[in-house]
Image (tube, rainbow, N blue to C red):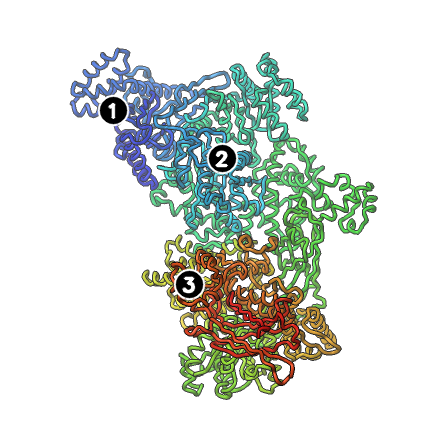
Amino acid sequence: MGYPASDANLHKVASLAQRLFKLQPADHGRSSVFERELNAGEDGVEFGADLIFQPPSRFLVDSLLDNDDLLEGPPSSRHDGWHDLDHGYSNSTYHHAVVDRRKLSLEWLSNACDRIVKECASQLSRDELAMAICRVLNSDKPGEEIAGDLLDLVGVSAFEAVQDLMLHRKELVDAIHQGLLMLKSDKTASNTQLRMPSYGTQVTVQTESERQIDKLRRKEEKRYKRGAENRVEDDLSATNFSSLLRASERRSPIEDLFGHGQGPNSLAVTALPQGTLRKHFKGYEEVIIPPTPTAPMKPGEKLIEIQELDGFAQAAFRGYKSLNRIQSQIFQTTYYTNENILVCAPTGAGKTNIAMIAILHEIGQHFRDGYLHKDEFKIVYVAPMKALAAEVTSAFSHRLSPLNMTVRELTGDMQLSKNELEETQMIVTTPEKWDVITRKSSDMSLSMLVKLLIIDEVHLLNDERGAVIEALVARTLRQVESTQTMIRIVGLSATLPSYLEVAQFLRVNPETGLFFFDSSYRPVPLAQQYIGISEHNFVARNALLNEICYNKVVDSLRQGHQAMVFVHSRKDTAKTAEKLVELSRMNEDLELFKNETHPQFSLIKKEVQKSRNKDLIGFFESGVGIHHAGMLRSDRGLTERLFSDGLIKVLVCTATLAWGVNLPAHTVVIKGTQLYDPKAGGWRDLGMLDVMQIFGRAGRPQFDKSGEGIIITSHDKLAYYLRLLTSQLPIESQFISSLKDNLNAEVALGTVTNVKEACLWLGYTYLSVRMKLNPLAYGIGWDEVMADPSLSSKQRALVTEAARALDKAKMIRFDEKSGNFSCTELGRIASHFYIQYSSVETYNEMLRPHMNDSEVIDMIANSSEFENIQVREEEQNELEMLARTSCPLEVKGGPSNKHGKISILIQLYISRGSIDSFSLVSDAAYISASLARIVRALFEICLRRGWCEMTSFMLEYCKAVDRQIWPHQHPLRQFDKDLSADILRKLEERGADLDRLQEMQEKDIGALIRYAPGGKLVKQYLGYFPWVQLSAAVSPITRTVLKVDLLITPDFVWKDRFHGAAQRWWILVEDSENDHIYHSELFMLTKRMSRGEPQKLSFTIPIFEPHPPQYFIRAVSDSWLQSEAFYTISFQNLQLPEARTSHTELLDLRPLPVTSLGNRTYESLYNFSHFNPIQTQTFHVLYHTDNNVLLGAPTGSGKTISAELAILHLFNTQPDMKVIYIAPLKAIVRERMNDWRKRLVSQLGKQMVEMTGDHTPDLMALMSADIIISTPEKWDGISRNWHSRSYVTKVGLMILDEIHLLGADRGPILEVIVSRMRYISSQTERSVRFIGLSTALANAGDLADWLGVGETGLFNFKPSVRPVPLEVHIQGYPGKYYCPRMNSMNKPAYAAICTHSPTKPVLIFVSSRRQTRLTALDLIQYAASDEHPRQFLSMPEEVLQMILSQVTDQNLRHTLQFGIGLHHAGLNDKDRSLIEELFANNKIQVLVCTSTLAWGVNLPAHLVIIKGTEYYDGKAKRYVDFPITDILQMMGRAGRPQYDQHGKAVILVHEPKKSFYKKFLYEPFPVESSLKEQLHDHINAEIVSGTICHKEDALHYLTWTYFFRRLVVNPAYYGLEDTAPEILSSYLSRLVQDTFEDLEDSGCIKMNDDGVEPLMLGSIASQYYLSYMTVSMFGSNIGPDTSLEFDELPVRHNEENYNEALSKNVPYMVDNNRLDDPHVKANLLFQAHFSQLELPISDYVTDLKSVLDQSIRIIQAMIDICANSGWLSSTITCMHLLQMVMQGLWYDKDSSLWMLPCMSSDLVSSLGKKGISSVQQLLDLPKANIQTVLEGFPASRISQDLQHFPRVQVKLKVQKSDTDGGTFSLNIKLAKMNSNRKTSRAFAPRFPKIKDEAWWLVLGNPSNSELYAVKRVSFSDRLVTHMELPSTPTNIEGMKLILLSDCYLGFEQEYSIKEL
């Protein structure tokens, strides 16, 4: 009766399955791992290898199958499961004693018979022989007889086979019985349909192949059954072998519970443990599983003692002696390596300590130099439940406190401020919360610091919240790869079957980091009872449930144990407790429960009586306690204490107790497994997590030998729980369900920008791991797997589908063609506020610009967050009542509708109403948890759409939800903790709003509320209510753009309790006519600001024709209801500037050839043949006339050459006159110098000098120069004294480059020098020709008028007239904070390079040096993750190495290797020019630079990226916008005239500014004057130079300025209402009068009747170019070295920290509260310079350069002031200060010997002992003596160093002068004695600039500190000079002449005059 067909079929299927198995990609590696470990076992290497494991009869252990075996072996044994009975990953338990499972099955028997039949030519067929053997084995004969029978059957030749049969007789017999049993049950099953469900039908999880095998099997069986039904089953003879074989393969129902896991790698854990009993009772069935005995300690396994840890780590384990077994086994890996780790161990096995060990390892890495560097790392611990998070926080903060670590909880309940987050080292959080934080790019800085991520309860992956963990891990892993930083992931989980896949997902190395412990590692073994109630009748079922529960509890009590009963709602706790007490009364078991014998009973009873909880007291009498989250904290604590002290024997509690509190009991009963879930809106089964956690509480580790866990459920769930708890269910991914939301989050974060990246990102999820192993579960058919084994197309499909949906909801823009994603505001809001995609769809549909309250509430109720909330019959009455009492708004749809119910609960939440029915309480709690973020998100959406009304409406609701106060209630309710409800109610009834209360007196308020003392209280709290006053100055820039300067003045008493550290205000500019918001920003008002002066905000807003009547500026508090301020901008009498922009048309002329210059020498200057169109059009005017010219043309259109034409014209006509070229930036000056030096100077033989801060040429050079190139300041300083400087009047041509910078901060100086030069030329009657060059201008007419340019000379071309057309892309980025926003721009910048200019040069402009570095590093990282790390580099390795060796800057050296250059003022000149050269020659493709490069260096590129348009202004202490001119200049660098058809510019801006830039980048920007702010200094200078003597002169002077021109055109900008002549003149004369008065107050000028005259301070200010404020301050308190000039010194972001560090190392104290003040920084920099400290960052080095540079003129001015006042000691102190600056030493502390470069401390002290303490003394020593003094120090080095210093000899002679009869003069001869020293350059290695030596001769009297005369001289060899002695000879006594150097310390020589 054999059915060979079936076997063949099975083989065929098996081979197919095996082929499939081979296709699974991820597994080859894995199998080889197992094999290796098996071998390891045989070598006896791994521990545990010497254990002999004897499998019990039913414990069948699979060994590994090779693929060939697979075809022979039975298809059903196709689990390569390797059930690891040992812990961890050592598979060594497969020892020789383990018998191959195939030997134990009938299949094996069948194979053996096959062999016997073949070899022995037996006459029986295989099946017959097998059947005969079965009969023999199954007989009851003794062993020897059976052996004999068998030998007879098979013949002697098969003796070994018989041996095997005998050895395994028991197993075979079991298999036979199993087969018979199955056949029998088949028979009964077919006859009578079972009423009871068989478990097998319940849950068998099968792979596809098994399913097919089953199908075949069933066919065979059906066919067989027809014949078999009339036989006797028990009789083996009647059974055919093949069916028996098949039947034995099938397993009994209860075994069937433990089906194969899914997928080839599942564990075939066999059936329930040994000794399991099943019992049937009436109405229920019980399965009892005995405790797994604890695995014995293995030889060689030892526990780790705590003292083996490092010292600091022991502190965290105080009170522990040693770690437990599990901790000891993983200790090595966790504590000494950085491996990722996954630990699967039973609950209660001490996983917290594993986390602790990992944390200590991390701390150890930051424990250097004896202390912990806390700011370098963060540790994040992700716990699934808030309760658990709280427990972990308290435990860890207590244990880590000795290490001074801060541990804080960050969950829905516990928010942390930014500062708190920064101070915290360990954050304990829930997955959702951490997801929200890492989703925001603004918190990047936080996630960058994370070095250790601990994920507790990883098996949550199976839960619907699992998707969050996947998103987190994927994000972390990608961050690790992209930033190349180490983040260690430690996963802790319960015992789970598919741990290998989870390990793969967490990137854990299975050999080193994966640990797996089974239940034998529970500290207390657990006996389990599963009870399934099969009763259907509801009442009977409940009664039975209570009864079983009671019986179990009583059993436990009888043995003297405590019991815990877990129920699933708060109300149930009391009900169950009552029931237990009631049943105990009925059964007269009350005594068991009671506990009156306890010694402390009476004491405790008194304490319990105090509680307000009636239930608690009542149950305590009976020895029962209850515990749930709804109880007061004190009551909960009391109950916990009573239970742990044994005063309560039975505790009835909810599951929160298991999570949050560690309270174990011997017996744990779970009563019922259904719990209400508001999220699902109904009942759901208790999850695996909860059950494990609750069972983890069974058994008290110190007292019990075993614990007992009992779960009472319904019969149909029995199998499910059995399976759960013997860990049979593989974990599947839940990621697909939330794919859209997570994809949107990644797009918003900027980590996923296209489909390719999205697929990569999916590859990091658990989904991608499981999808390949179990495709069916994810809806992927086998055919798809065959076609695409890596499932990449499936991933692509998933991503594309999600992206399309998101695109439809407007959350991202998805360009299907290119596959690119770009984020939208909506998507960003959804991501940040954790709003689901489906909700966004709802809002898109329902949100309108005008809605009323109930519509809004209804829309919120429609959010998908709440979609699961159900409406129940039993709640209707209560809901109706609530709707009447607590809902001020109408409820759409009424209480019977789902959305109606939600809207009632929302209103109830704001009204603070109370609820009775349990399901409503949990629904309400669920709603209130999500409400705040939904309302915030809606507010943001309305704000982004620019809807006024809805924005303010939603903001009100945000605050209403936060405060639980309705917007219509009285705002003082926000102080409801302090003001009584009574007062508030009366205020509301009397309708006393805030404004009315503000005006009333205390007693009136008291009368109003009929409670006198209340008046004072109300008034006091009114003072705390946050008010601000607004005032604004509006200045029109053009007809369509207004600039608003808003002043915000806080007007309330700041109290930390109410206002915290900062208050946030929304500043909104709205046009109520058109319902639109034109500007919105969030303003932070800090406590410090609230006391100080008003805060100023500046922004621009558009204005449209026809003008609306007004705009409103509103400041609305972000957190206080009804706290807002208004300001109205009225347009009634606002004068807008006239709209006239005249552009010159570019004529279509034929380009002029160079030969038209008509001069061979000139032609040779140019290396091109024809001029470009702009030069052609302007050629005639420039080269053939003397007209003034203003040329406005876009950057890069060859304006410089136009200027050269004018120069050449001057050389032709007036060769003796000078050209002065003024450029506003040093960088431009330098570029011009280099360019013209090569051409004009060398080829035309002209002289040229540069005048900048760096170079001050001497008089001779200036006299002989033909071309002077200067910055405005220098020329201003020189031309102030034009009367005395002839060369100023010899200027014939003045070229002003970049004249549009008139509007920038240095504009006034430009204005003054032009006005002065025109004034000079009108005085001397020599005409000066002016050439102005600028970009395209909006108001060219005014500029032309001011420069004296006529109609013919004005050229103002459109911005579009570029030689290389430009295409501009503007992209907006949100992000409140600057640094994270810059960070989020890096990826788009990289993408822009790849799209627009993959191979051509790219310039990236950033705002600071720090940004250059960060940007470059990020670009390198993106290039590396694209697998082209060196794509920007185009030079061979050896060239690169040679170049790198020349680079000094560390960062630059790093980035250059990747072809990215850095360029900023912090580099030294050599590095800078090297970089410029590399970039110009295309050796490197990308140059990241600061904005200065745009001006100075002409390095065009194909693509320009402007990354961020703001910079940090140290003076204003915030980020301010670049002037638009700078942006235009940067853009102008795009497009290289010789190479490119067009240039590209990508501008990345802050989202709100996008429209502003769109407007002004295309239409020219008007230039306004800023002279008014700096008028004082310039008027002072003119008074000193004699230009202004009266007020009329000053007015006349003003009419020459550009300020005057603009004042007439755009009066509103300068604060003038009208331009009528009389108003104008009174405005100007008031301006002049105020200026004069200020100058007089500061002591710079003196006013008499009608004139003014300069005073000494004024002259000094003018001469040394100082601010009048500075000199007046010096005049009033000279002495301390303070000054105003350092206002401009940048204190960049976060530099106060560096400043603080510096302040600790310098000798003089600074004010620590003002570390962000530029003056303090300057002071610190000086002190650091004198102390020769190492400066923290390169920026400081540069700042120091500029500070030192400026300080020279300031100190010289101080010397002049002191000398003029005749103070000797102050003068000399100032001179010493100058020497200190030059040498970088302290005058009083350091010996002047330190000026020698070779000096060392030892040498100084040894010379000091010999009495030598200055360089002067060494110089005076004869050569011979030097060696003896030095004692072995090489004299040659010292004498070489001494060469640098001059030796000056002084000869004096007093002469009586003949002319005046009485005066004496002093003749002085100075001579340098160093014969071989030729130079007079000063030797000052620490001073940044070249300087010449100079000397002061000071005549004074030190005894009374009087100074008579001072003279400054410089000479190269010798000098004769004379000084007048004071005429009164009386005080010649103490008079001395002192010679001081201005650059060397200790070179003073004193000569007493008396001796002469």
Where is residue 1566, by image quadrant? bottom right
Asked whether 62 or 625 is in front, the reply is 625
Q: Residue 93, percent across and down?
A: 32, 28
Instruction: Please give the residue where the numbered disc 3 appears in the rendered image.
Output: 1397
Q: Are marks 3 and 1 in contact (CB under 8 Å)?
A: no
For badge 3, the amino acid type reads: Ser
Instruction: Please give the residue where the numbered disc 1 appears in the rendered image.
Output: 110
Where is residue 885, by image quadrant? top right
Q: Upstream in the sequence, badge 3 or badge 1? A: 1
Task: Identify the element where label 3 is drawn.
Answer: loop
Q: Is residue 292 left or right of residue 907?
A: left
Reply above or below: 972 against 1454.
above
Reply above or below: 379 against 920.
below
Q: Are marks 2 and 1 in contact (CB under 8 Å)?
A: no
For badge 2, the amino acid type reads: Ala
Where is residue 1825, by image quadrant? bottom left
Q: Is residue 792 left or right of residue 1257?
A: left
Asked whether 319 or 352 is in front, the reply is 319
Within 10 Å of the Cα at label 2, are there few (<14), some (14-19), or many (20+) other Cα atoms? many
For the residues labelled 2 and 1, the Cα–Cα distance comes to: 62 Å
Q: Is residue 874 left or right of residue 208?
A: right
Asked whether 573 or 332 is in front, the reply is 332
Within 10 Å of the Cα at label 3, are there few (<14), some (14-19), or many (20+) other Cα atoms? some
